[in-house]
Amino acid sequence: MTSQQSSPADSRDPATTGPAHRSDVLEAALPPAVSGATLSSAVAAGGVPASTGGSGAGFPHGGPTVDRSPVIIARGLVRHYHRGSETVRALDGVDLDVRSGEMVAILGPSGSGKTTLINLLSCLDAPDAGTLTVAGRPVTGLGEEALTAVRRGRIGFVFQKFHLLPALTVAENVELPQLFLEQPIDRAHTLEVLRAVDLENRATHLPRELSGGQMQRVAVARALITRPAILIADEPTGNLDRANGEALFALFRRLIAQEGLAVVVTTHNHHLAEQADRIITLEDGRIVREERGCGVGERVTEGG
Ligand SMILES: Nc1ncnc2c1ncn2[C@@H]1O[C@H](COP(=O)(O)OP(=O)(O)OP(=O)(O)O)[C@@H](O)[C@H]1O
Ligand SMILES: [Mg+2]
C-alpha cells in the first residue's frame, strides 16, 4: 500500500464528469492508499457517530478535558506481505501506545514500515499477528465491516497528496466525508473547522486558488470535520516546503492542545519530528529507537 501513486482525481477529473455523478466525484476524492471495499471508509473515517448529529455541537468537540488513557495500544504487531515464495517482513513485532493529547512522530528510511504501521493503527489494514486496541475497542481479528465501524467517528486521515476535488470549493471538500456518510451538513460547523486551520476566509475558493500549505490545511479540516479522537497523517509535509511543513506541525500541536486529539504522523524530517512528544524510529519493520521530542503542547506522562 502506498500513497505515492497518482491520485484517482488525476484520471477521473470531476470537472469533466460533473458533480451530478456524485459517486464518481466522491471516489475521486479518495486517497489511492485505499481501494475497493475500503474506499468509502477512508474518506468516511472519522464519520459522525449516529448520536452526534451534525449541528450545534460546534468545534472543538472534545473540550479542554483530556482523557490521558491510551487511545491506541499495539502489542507485537506483525504484517508480512507474501509475493510468490518471497516474504516481505514489513512490520515485525511493534509495540506502541498513543495517548490523547500527544503527538507521536514515526521516522525511518524508505521501506522501513512506516505506512504499513499507520495503516494498521488506523484500521485500514489488519495485522497478521499481535493485538491492537483503538479507542477502547479491540480490533484484532475484525473483518472489514467491523473495522470500518471502528474507524468511523474516531480516526481522521491526512495523506501526502492532498486529494482535493478541483471542482468543489474548500468548504465542499471539507464536507465530503459527511456527504459520503449521508450525514447532515452544517456549514456553520464547517466554518468553525476551517477557522481552526486558519482558512475560514477561503471557504468559497477552489483548490487551484490555494497554496500547497493551504491545500494541506483543507485536507486536515476534512479529516477533522467528523470530530475524530485520532488524527493520522502519512508524510503530510512530503509535498510542502519547509515553512509550510513547520506550519502544519504547529497546527497539529495547536489542535492537540485545543482538542485533546491524539496525532500520529510519519515523516522523513527529523527536525519536524522533534515537534512531537515522542519520536519512534523504525528500521526493517522494528522500532529501533524511541526518543522524547520537544512537543510544546500538553505533556503526557506514563500512567496518566
Ligand atoms: N502491498 C504490499 N505488497 C508487498 N510488499 C509491500 C506492500 N506494501 C508495502 N510493502 C513492502 O513493505 C515494506 C514497508 O513498506 P512501507 O510502505 O510501510 O514503508 P515506508 O516506511 O512507509 O516507506 P516510505 O518512506 O518510502 O513511504 C517495503 O519493503 C515495501 O516494499
Ligand atoms: Mg510510506
Image (spheres, rainbow, N blue to C red):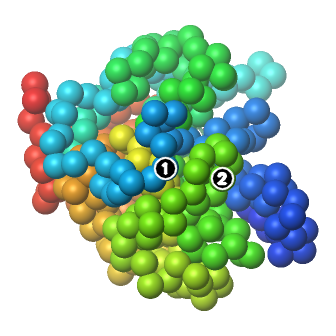
Location of the N terminus by quadrant is: top right
Which image quarter: residue 230? Answer: top left
Three-letter code for the amino acid on which mark 1 is drawn? Gly
The answer to whether the residue bearing label 2 lies less than 8 angstroms from the nearest atom of ligand 2 is no
User: Which residue is located at x 34 percent, y 68 percent?
Assistant: 196
Kindly tell me whether residue 26 is visible in this rendering: yes
* Image position of 93 (left or right of 170): left
* Image position of 53 (left or right of 207): left
The residue to which callout 2 is attached is 179
* Image position of 33 (left or right of 300): right
Q: Is residue 243 above or below residue 82?
A: below
Number of callouts: 2
User: Which residue is located at x 90 percent, y 68 percent?
Assistant: 17
The front one of 13 and 115 is 13
Which image quarter: residue 100? Answer: top left
Q: In this view, does 204 lie above or below 1?
A: below
